[in-house]
Image: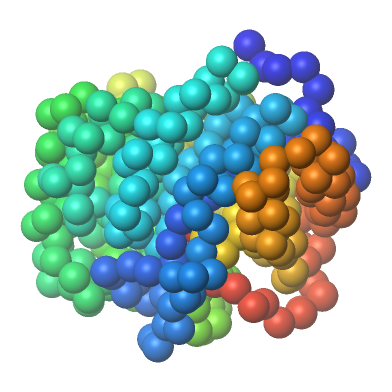
Amino acid sequence: MQNTASFWVDQFGREKRKLRISVTDRCNFKCSYCMPEHPEWMKKKNLVSFEALYQFCELMVQGGIESIRITGGEPLMRKGVVHFIEQLQQLKPLGLKRISMTSNGHYLKKYALALKQAGLDDLNISLDTLDAEQFHKLTKNNLEPVLSGIEQAQQVGLAVKINTVLINGQNEDQILPLVVWAKAQNMSLRFIEFMPLDGDAHWQKQNVITEQDILTVLATQYQLQLQTQGSEPARRYLLDEQYEIGIISTISHAFCGSCDRIRMTAQGELYNCLFATEGLALKPQLDVLLANPNVDLKKQLQQKIQQYVWQKESGFDAIYAKKQPRKISMHMLGG
Ligand code: SAM
Ligand code: SF4
């Protein structure tokens, strides 16, 4: 059941129900489609504390947010993240329905059980190839810890979904192997089109493996049936009436018309769209509110966020057409 009206609504009437919080920009991988070659990490003193973040989440849930996803960088690299997830459980009686995480899976063997015990509802793991050499080329790290992390996550009973970004000339040969593997593991799989959010801005349209490219490959082995789409960005296909995969085709079929998401960076900048060129800096106000919790300050903050959310553009096409330079890439925004 959905909460009544959301306080967080944009000028096109799209209510925000999902909040993604990046807890760090740091990562032990260096996926070329995400991380710049020479990242300049955020300074630790500039990160929003978990105490201030909790207070922010409470405000957002009170306004209608129903789902919070913890991401990064690599979220498991931020000390205290498991405890933060445990704390977020207190927001469930206020309307929060799901607490999720997106991770590269490298540290999962160590953290899977703790995450399950902290009440994490679901976990997306990014895995772009099953070929160890290709994996190393793409991420500059090793495949094995990710595979054992996934195994551990399944053993402790976490609901795992695999996310795969396909890049032309790098891993498009992995479409069928990943489907066969994920189906055998009984895990959901979603392919994601490469978006112009890479750290070094080398993105080119010809590097995108589109939904249609993926379907063409799948059709050589499976009968495909498009499923009815809900509020999720992925278009779902049933393969041989048995196994469902999803495709997030932001480039070839932008789903902006029903976007219900907002995002915050680890430094406390709120972004009303993945492609927004400007965020809203909230850390100073969150720190003041934490030191001096009072109703007026909370109201001011609420109005500031509401105004910024209201200004959300219609979508990717509208923003991309302006060709304004971006200050931020995926490793800071969290996907
Ligand atoms: N480090 C974690 C991980 O890799 O899952 C969480 C952060 S990562 C930025 C979140 C998601 O963004 C991953 O699934 C990743 O594949 C995806 N991603 C990163 N850069 C992308 C891009 N340029 N286009 C599409 N997806 C991208
Ligand atoms: Fe790290 Fe995730 Fe970006 Fe890869 S996609 S560099 S794992 S933050």
Q: Position of residue 243 (x, y in %)?
A: 32, 27
Residue 306 visible in the displayed image: no
- Is residue 119 visible to the viewer in this orientation of the structure? yes
From the viewer's perspective, tell me whether residue 70 is left or right of residue 290.
left
Whole-percent x, y for residue 255 in the image:
67, 45
Identify the image quadrant of residue 99: top left
In this view, which residue lies farthest toward the right? 11
Task: Report the front residue among 164 and 103.
Answer: 103
On the image, the x and y values in percent for residue 332 come to 51, 67
The residue at 69%/46% (across/down) is: 292
Judged from this view, the residue extending furthest toward the front is 292
The residue depicted at 44 percent of the width and 51 percent of the height is 71
Give how far across and how far down residue 127 sits, in percent: 28, 54
Report the colour scheme: rainbow
* Quadrant of residue 329 within the rendered picture: bottom right
Quadrant (top left/top right/bottom left/bottom right) for the N terminus: top right
Which residue occupies the foreground of this view, 175 or 104?
Answer: 104
Residue at 20%, 43% in the rendered image: 111
Q: Residue at x 54, y 40 (%)?
A: 54
Q: Quarter of the picture for ligand 2?
A: bottom left
Residue that sits furthest to the top in the current view = 1
